[in-house]
Image (cartoon, rainbow, N blue to C red):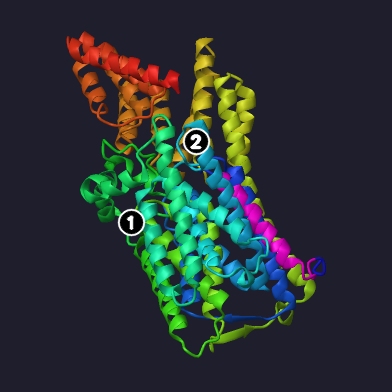
Amino acid sequence: MLTILKQPKTSLLFSAFFIISLTSALFYTGNNTWLFTTSYLMVVLSLAIALKQRFYKPINISINGIFISAILLLIWFAISIFPSQIKYLSLYNFFWVGSLIIIFLIFTFHDDKDQTWNNIWPGILLLVMVWAGYGLVQYYYLHVPTNATFLNRNSLAALINLALLPASGYFLLNEKDRPWKKLNNKVLASILIILFLSIFIITSRGASLSLALGFIILLMLLRKYIDKSKLNSFFVIIFIAFLLATLSQYFIPSSPQGFAERMVSLKDASEAGNPRFIIWKSLIPLFEEMPWYGFGLGSLWVFWPPHRPFTDNSAGYFAHNDYMQITLEAGYPGILLLVVLFIFILFYFIRTLKNNNNTLSLIHRVELVSIFSALVTFSAHSFFTYNFYILPLLLIAGSYLGRFNQLVNINSKSIRTIPAFKVYFKPIMFVISMAGLIFILCSYFISVSLSSYYNIQAKELMLQKKYQASNAYFLKAQTLAPLMDNPFFSHADLLRRGANKLLGVNKNRQANSLLKLAHKNLDKAEKLNPLRPQTHHIRGLIYEKKQPEKAKIEFKQALKLDPRFLFSRIRLARLLHKENQLKAAMEVLYEGVNYNYHVNKVMLEYMQFFAKLSREAGVESFALHLEANIKKYISENRQK
């Protein structure tokens, strides 16, 4: 088994796994877990190759500050899972947010790093160019937001930035100095025009400012080593891309604000950053509530709803400042270790460039400066967005950090040799250990993916009133991912519906049995995630008919956890209205009126019911106002 990958082609195979992983990650938006699983299965296979290589060959590695702080950060991420209130979220996000460090470590322990880098970087550039091209198609042809497969255009801009800086560095080299013959001046110039044009079209202010910072570093540190004619050609490329973006405004109907106008808006910093300032201000109370070790990776969105401002129209998952979010989720040790990692990156970068005795070649110098500039751009942009929570960005940044660490250690005197594993393991024991590790990791990712699939299928079958089939799928979802609360409270809702059907035909005993099981599922769900409003809402639905007071308590608790949870707001108001408490019902509905909601059936039901009660209460003007908004939302939705 160990001889299968003993050929020198392992670097090519390793690179292929990385590119497949990155491609899958580029389509991952947070819900389609099978894409995350596919991406991570490729990461696991890359890890297997690195471990296999270490069985046969020793590795020379520098145990420097970058390596140690990265290891400690990943260890802390793992430790923080245990005190987390919602362990399945923290476990999943350990792999998600920890991807940067995981890829860095795999790259570091992989053999033949030069060949691997020469394989994967053109793949990264090609994928980014395709995604940038897709964004241009969206803008010029489809006339939709320029975000490619991402949910936010800032994420596409961050992706382009990561490729743009190294691509620019390589362009400033002469063709003969580049390791890729196909990336000649014409090809690379064309790619740069596409990437710059995309950045100018996206008009992300945070991404543009951070990119400008990256280019200042790049050009300042390379000005002595590059040909002026190449630099002039580079500025011509930027000008052409900017000209194309500017002229586009005159040919694209209803085009958004242009790049220049967006940058000028930064003169009023309070206005330009106002949406983020509102978000950041609302997070301050959470710093007072959080324990020193944080809420747990990936948990911000369940702790934040009671503090979220009315005007926030984001999805509610991210702080739009990674350093605030990492502090809240991973605690003070997490953010401290991340800052220490940044300090060591800067320290080794400066030391390497200042070392007059080093034999850093021109291409290695360009790569070092370009990668450092890209990492600075990535980190600076993260003050205004959530780059550390976008999987493809983390995979690329992790590979960059691995290459950067390799370059700063080319002439290091602190290189240590780690003996080959065959010194410590017999072949059969190594095979068993590696197979076991791969099996455990793959089983976790596949189980989570299948559980999500079965849970989605079960919900669809439940809505189709195919209760038996739905029940079977929910049980599978619970078995595959016993730490996830979603299959449990969703199953409880199915049992509630089934019980109501049995009560309708006077099968009270069977109905009570289902309701008892439903409560058991809800208790389990609440234990796994005590901050989920759905659990209390479903419990309230069970109590609604025979124990309305208990139902009110549950609906109120759901709204306490998330004031935007319209399902419970509507149900609570209906209960109060049914008991002739019109004023109390109006107050419940009014408490939610100022929040921003996505337009859907529940939101329209809320407004229609609010209009009805307003008219009943004699507030005709407000009822007409609500009904006018309903017509507006329906009209806009039809146009979309």
Q: Residue at x 59, y 61 (%)?
A: 185
> Is 472 contained in the magenta span?
no
Q: Residue at x 56, y 75 (%)?
A: 364
Please identify the quarter of the rendering in which residue 604 is found: top left
User: Could you tell me residue 477's position as x and y percent?
Assistant: 60, 38
> Is 12 contained in the magenta span?
yes
C-alpha distance separating marks 1 and 2: 36 Å
Q: Are marks 1 and 2 in contact (CB under 8 Å)?
A: no
Helix, strand or loop status at disc 1: helix
User: Could you tell me residue 624's position as x and y percent?
Assistant: 24, 12
Predominant secondary structure, magenta span: helix
| Quadrant (top left, top right, bottom left, bottom right) of the N terminus | bottom right
Count of labels shown? 2
In this figure, which residue is indicated by the disc labeled 2?
A: 140
Q: Earlier in the sequence, mark 1 or mark 2?
A: 2
Query: Is there any visible trace of residue 420 in the rendered image?
Result: yes
Please identify the quarter of the rendering in which residue 437 is found: bottom right
For label 2, the crowd category at 10 Å Cα-Cα, with few meaning under 14, some 14 to 19 and many 20 or more, is: some
Residue type, numbered disc 1: Met
Magenta segment: 5-27
Residue type, numbered disc 2: Tyr
Helix, strand or loop status at disc 2: helix
Residue placed most toward the observer, 423 or 541? 423
574 to the left or right of 499: left
In this rendering, the answer to whether 639 lies above or below 440 is above
In this figure, which residue is indicated by the disc labeled 1?
A: 324
